[in-house]
Image (cartoon, rainbow, N blue to C red):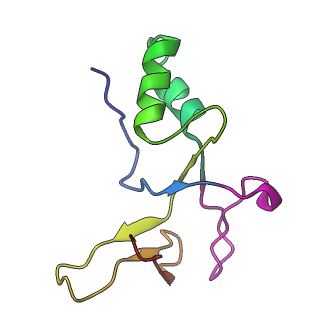
Amino acid sequence: MLGFKFESMYVLLYKPQMSDKHTMICRHCGENLDGGDIYEVLRENHPDATDEQILRMAKSYGWTRETPIRFSHEVVVQPDSRSEPEYTECPACHGVNPCAPRH
């Protein structure tokens, strides 16, 4: 089984809207947080993998050809206390944003 080797621990997934053209910008400092299309990033990091293997790995992140998803460099922080909400943090400026509640 192939694993994904990250250069960092930033793994937030991002599904771009039609209007934003794959940009995810920190609202605090303007840093580009777009980590790239999941399929393409996996293809680059696993050059010896077959297309079927890459597609299986990409699908495990929720990626499909019809609904591509992108990686983000934004860090998801999960506090130790369950009473504190999750939030995201920009790796460049450490600006904090609340996470949407999970259902």
What residue is shown at x 32% (from left), y 23% (from top)?
2
Quadrant where the C terminus is found in the figure: bottom left
What residue is shown at x 47% (from left), y 28% (from top)?
45
Residue 37's x, y, as percent? 61, 40
Q: Main secondary structure of the magenta part?
A: loop
Q: Nearer the viewer, residue 90 or 86?
A: 86
Residue that protrudes farthest toward the front in the picture: 103
User: Eyeballing the image, is 67 above or below 20?
Assistant: above
Residue 23's x, y, as percent? 72, 59
Residue 56 location, quadrant: top left
User: Image check: 80 left or right of 24?
Assistant: left
Q: Which residues are magenta?
A: 16-34
User: Eyeballing the image, is 47 above or below 30?
Assistant: above
What residue is shown at x 22% (from left), y 89% (from top)?
83
Residue that protrudes farthest toward the bottom in the picture: 83
Residue that protrudes farthest toward the right in the picture: 19
Residue 40 location, quadrant: top right
8 in magenta: no
User: Image check: 29 left or right of 8?
Assistant: right
Quadrant where the N terminus is found in the figure: top left
What residue is shown at x 41% (from left), y 29% (from top)?
57
